[in-house]
Image (cartoon, rainbow, N blue to C red):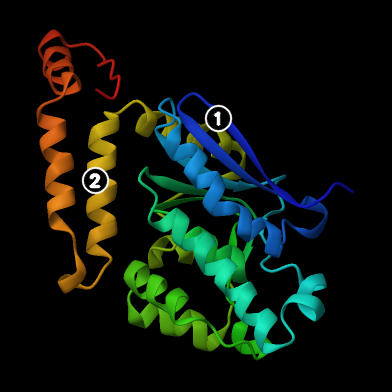
């Protein structure tokens, strides 16, 4: 069994971050959480990358949550608990605040920390067999304020309260209705549909994607802390870009635009 890690694969404008511990249903280790900010930064620095996609190795799970084999060492005393929690929420924040759009591709189990990771992405695409749960209330874990805040922003207080207080399993169809996933496909079609969706985003104007993502990030902050000027600067860059001219020309000529991010 190989060492648990997050594999990084960049192709066709998409940086794929693959949670790679299939023997443990892609359970997340401290090291995997700690690696996320650097992997996100790598994708942000690559001009060929238009978006990030997070998935789990294999078809059984996106992630079953925390790797419990580390609990005795990493989550037993106040100091180690604090360090572990800091790594978790720094990793989640790296995805949530990334300069480029982030999409979670979810098959099978998406529990606990895996659920938190998926909800840190801008969009979530699910396969019909996906199942969602936050079992903190069954384990006696105190769930971080940052995690609750993200869920409330994504799902609202009612759905968040239901998920957290009941600790129940949410099946895929209900997850779509509740807004946990943005799209849902049957398992045979999932890979192709998800790939086509990612390709659709990757084919759009990179500067526009960045401006939209920045607006989403700023709208997630308290109103008094929002940097609206940064969003307006990115919008202005879109209007001054060669891609803006290309988009108009392609529309007039009834062809697909070819965007270069300039």
**Residue at numbered disc 1:** 10
Image spot of residue 27 (x, y percent): 72, 61
Q: Is residue 212 left or right of residue 71?
A: left
Identify the residue at horizontal 52%, vertical 53% (top origin).
37
- Quarter occupied by the C terminus: top left
Q: Is residue 234 visible?
A: yes
**Residue at numbered disc 2:** 212
In the foreground, 88 or 182:
88
The local secondary structure at tag 2 comes to helix
Identify the residue at horizontal 47%, vertical 41% (top origin).
52
Identify the residue at horizontal 72%, vertical 88% (top origin).
77
Residue at the limit of the structure toward the top, as seen here = 253
Does 111 sit above or below residue 99?
A: below
Q: Is residue 128 visible?
A: no
Quadrant of the rendered image containing residue 31: bottom right
Image spot of residue 122 (x, y percent): 38, 53
In the foreground, 126 or 92:
92
The local secondary structure at tag 1 comes to strand
Sequence order check, earlier mark of 1 and 2: 1
Residue at the limit of the structure toward the front, as seen here = 79
Question: How far apart in space, not on screen, are marks 1 and 2 (Cα)?
Answer: 22 Å
Image spot of residue 185 (x, y percent): 50, 45
Q: Is residue 120 left or right of residue 154?
A: right
């Amino acid at each position: 069994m190989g060492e648990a890690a997050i594999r990084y694969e960049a192709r066709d404008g998409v940086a794929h971050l693959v949670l790679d511990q299939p023997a443990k249903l892609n359970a997340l280790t401290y090291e995997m959480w700690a690696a996320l900010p650097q992997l996100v930064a790598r994708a942000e620095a690559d001009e060929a990358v238009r978006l990030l996609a997070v998935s789990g190795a294999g078809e059984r799970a996106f992630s079953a949550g925390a790797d419990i084999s580390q609990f005795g060492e990493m989550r037993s005393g106040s100091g180690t608990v604090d360090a572990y929690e800091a790594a978790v929420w720094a990793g989640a924040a790296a995805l949530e605040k990334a300069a480029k759009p982030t999409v979670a591709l979810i098959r099978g189990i998406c529990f606990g920390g895996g659920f938190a990771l998926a909800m840190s992405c801008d969009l979530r695409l699910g396969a019909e067999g996906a199942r969602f749960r936050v079992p903190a209330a069954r384990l006696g874990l105190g769930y971080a304020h940052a995690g609750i805040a993200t869920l409330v922003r994504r799902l609202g207080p009612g759905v968040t309260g239901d998920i957290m207080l009941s600790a129940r399993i949410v099946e895929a169809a209900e997850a779509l209705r509740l807004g946990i996933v943005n799209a849902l496909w049957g398992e045979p079609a999932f890979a192709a549909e998800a790939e086509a969706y990612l390709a659709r985003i990757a084919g759009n104007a990179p500067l526009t994607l960045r401006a939209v993502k920045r607006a989403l990030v700023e709208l997630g902050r308290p109103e008094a802390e929002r940097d609206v000027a940064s969003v307006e600067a990115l919008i202005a860059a879109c209007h001054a870009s060669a891609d803006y001219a290309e988009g108009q020309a392609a529309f007039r000529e009834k062809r697909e635009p070819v965007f270069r991010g300039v």
